[in-house]
Amino acid sequence: MSHKQKVRIGMIGYKFMGKAHSHAYRDLPFYFDLGIEPVLQTMVGRDKTSVKLASEKFGWLSYETDWRRLIEREDIDVIDIGTPNNTHVEIAIAAAEAGKHIICEKPLALNTQQALNMLKAVQKAGVIHMVSYNYRFVPAIQYAKKLIQDGMLGEIYHFRAQYLQDWIMDPGFPLVWRLRKDVCGSGSLGDLMAHSIDLARFLVGEIKEVTGMMETFIKKRPLGEMSGGLSASISGESFADVDVDDAVAAMARFENGAVGVFEATRFGKGNRNGNRLEINGSKGSIRWDMESMNTLQLYLEEDTPGMQGFRSINCTESVHPYGEAYWPAGHIIGYEHTFINLMHDFMKGILTNTNPNPNFEDGYRNQVILDAIEKSASAGKWMKIKY
Ligand SMILES: NC(=O)c1ccc[n+]([C@@H]2O[C@H](COP(=O)([O-])OP(=O)(O)OC[C@H]3O[C@@H](n4cnc5c(N)ncnc54)[C@H](O)[C@@H]3O)[C@@H](O)[C@H]2O)c1
């Protein structure tokens, strides 16, 4: 018999993130001996046939068709929100009021006010909360954080990040929820640049001011629905206006004096998930690219003259963050492991009654920066960041 503490999960949404989170809960006890066993108690979706199928495929014990019913249930300890951005606020506040721990997908909300209301609700309820900025949980990123904290790069001067995808370049790609402002809040800004902002705050520190520029290349699209992952299908013959950004660029000043340059687009032909960053300091630099996520490129000034250059570190050794949980050195991990590592920190937070990072405070701060970039893009001026 297992003596592990059972944590019963109720997951809302069963497509892209529903799959990623389900997999992470299932694999977590396989790799980490935490003293906790996540129980895939109930999955929620509005369509009975589809949610039943998904719940069986992903290994859930039961399903519901109404998230409100899930939140009322006493056999649920955690609410996992994997639904479109406009639903996060109502679900999270109801879950907090019912005393459930919460993990919410990013961006936390549609705007700063919603994110602040969510933060206040979880703080008032005293529940454990986390926002799913999963790229923090790439071991190479965690190792980069350690190198920066240990002073290996010296004083940080530059943070530059690109997050480039290309899945909506076909003008016939439909106007799914990710392209409707009332449902997603913003386009490549909240979808992609939000991740780079989270990594910037994690690795370099707080941002004090930003300026932004946004563009929408395809102004009208046919109506349609997401069908899983980043695929979609057209429904009917109607077209509607696109009211979110296809591309966004931003500059930032950090409180510690560093400067940041950010670019995010869904029109970067050939880039499927080109999530990259570079940091330059007084003593060294790092480079990282999600499409080779296990590798951290490191340049150190202290290297012998003549032998200086970027070295490639395969962050799969037992000394690397989360390294011991997986395979022998050099036996690489992938996208899904970022969610396993994230769920590890979330479950540990529940076990120790300590909020993990990133939590709703980070989600709120991220949202303040997103809103400031959007305001700057329409006002044409720098915006101060005020939390
Ligand atoms: N961390 C990441 O890297 C990452 C990647 C993709 C998406 N996301 C975020 O995850 C969230 C979900 O995105 P996705 O890609 O999984 O979307 P998706 O379209 O693949 O799935 C959304 C799911 O929510 C369900 N849903 C929609 N409205 C609902 C409602 N009112 N009640 C109950 N269920 C509802 C849909 O049926 C579907 O199962 C979004 O906030 C998105 O920004 C994060």
Image: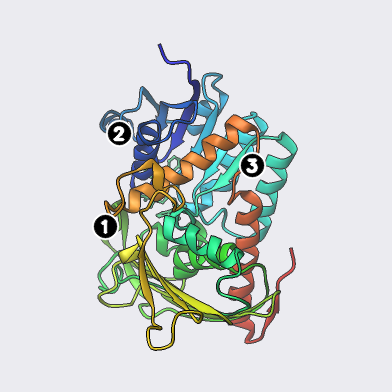
Q: Is mark 3 within 8 Å of ligand 1?
A: no
Q: Nearer the viewer, residue 332 or 152?
A: 152
Residue 95 seen from this side: yes
Q: Disc 3 designates what residue?
A: 355
- Residue 244 drawn above or below residue 41: below
Q: Residues within 10 Å of mark 1 (few under 14, many from 20)?
A: few
Residue drawn at the location 68% of the way across and 80% of the way down: 257
Mark 3 element type: loop
Q: Earlier in the sequence, mark 1 or mark 3?
A: 1
Residue drawn at the location 51% of the way across and 59% of the way down: 182
- Residue 326 drawn above or below residue 159: above
Q: Which mark is residue 354?
A: none
Q: Is mark 2 within 8 Å of ligand 1?
A: no
Badge 1 amino acid: Ser
* Image coords of residue 346 (percent x, y): 53, 40
> Split into 4 quadrants, where in the image is the C terminus?
bottom right
> Split into 4 quadrants, where in the image is the N terminus?
top left
Q: Nearer the viewer, residue 214 or 103?
A: 103
Q: Earlier in the sequence, mark 3 or mark 2?
A: 2
Q: Disc 1 designates what residue?
A: 231
Q: Is mark 1 within 8 Å of ligand 1?
A: no
Distance Cα–Cα, label 1 vs label 3: 34 Å
Mark 1 element type: strand
Q: Disc 2 designates what residue?
A: 58
Q: Is residue 380 left or right of residue 339?
A: right
Q: Earlier in the sequence, mark 2 or mark 1?
A: 2
